[in-house]
Amino acid sequence: MKIKKINEKIWPSGKVEIFQRKEGEMTWVKIGEEHNLITNAGFQAIGNHLGGNGAYSATTFKYFAWGDGTTAPAVTRTAADFYSDCANSDTKLVALVNTFDVATKTQQWDCYLSSSDNAVATIKKFALMNADPGTIMFNEVLFSTPYSKDSTINLYFKYTLTLSQA
C-alpha cells in the first residue's frame, strides 16, 4: 500500500486595525490598518504550541505594548529591542483574547487604551507581548502614520492573526 504524502502549508499573517473614540462619544471610528511582521520568537511560539513542547509551549501573548520607536520591524527583533527603540513606551493587559474561529481561521486580540493611558503621546509601534513588561515579543508593527494620544482620546487596537492554507 502506497502512502500518500500530504503537503499542506499554513501561512500566518497578522494585521492591526486602529479605532479612535473621543472621550464622551459612543462610536468607534476606524483610523488605520497595518500589517505586521511576526518575529522568529512568534513563529517558534506557534510551533511549540502545536507540538506541546519547546521553550515557548506555555507562552501566551496576553499583553500589548505601544511606543514611539522608529526602527523597522525585523524577524530577529526581540521585546528588549522594542523597548530600547522607544523613548516612551508602555505595556498593558489585553482586554480580550477571543477564541480561535475555525470557520475564518482567525484569532483576535482586543487591546484598548483609555483616556488615562497617556504614557506615549505619539504612537508609532505596536506589539503583542508575553508579560508586562514583555520579555518575548510575538509580532511588531511600525505604523506608517503615527497616532496621537492624549486624555481626550480612547484607542482600540484590534489585532487579527489569520492562518491561511496554501
Image (cartoon, grey):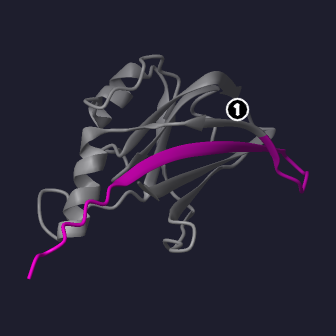
Residue appearing at x 59%, y 44% in the figure = 16
Q: Which quadrant is home to the N terminus?
A: bottom left
Residue drawn at x 33%, y 53% as measured from the top left: 130
Residue furthest right as drawn: 25
Nearer to me, 101 or 124: 101
> Where is the C terminus found, in terms of image quarters?
bottom left
Q: Is residue 163 above or below residue 13?
A: below
Displayed quadrant of residue 48: bottom left
Residue sitting at the far top: 70
Residue at the far left: name it.
Answer: 1
Q: What's the residue type where badge 1 is placed?
A: Lys
Please, what secondary structure does the residue beneath circle 1 have? loop
Label 1, on which residue? 149
Answer yes or no: is residue 40 visible: yes
Image location of residue 115, percent across then percent down: 73, 45
In the orientation shown, which residue stands out farthest toward the front? 1
Q: Residues within 10 Å of mark 1 (few under 14, many from 20)?
A: many
Give the left or right position of residue 147, taking residue 47 as reference: right
Task: From this view, report whether residue 41 is shown above or below residue 166.
Answer: above
Q: Is residue 23 magenta?
A: yes
Q: Which residues are magenta?
A: 1-30
Residue 8, located in which quarter of the rendered image?
A: bottom left
Report the side of 9 relative to 35 (left or right): left
Residue located at (53% from left, 23% from top): 68
Tell me where residue 6 appears, x and y as whole percent: 24, 66
Point out residue 165 in the picture as x, y percentages from the top left corner: 42, 58
Point out residue 103 in the picture as x, y percentages from the top left corner.
56, 73
Residue at 30% over, 27% down? 81
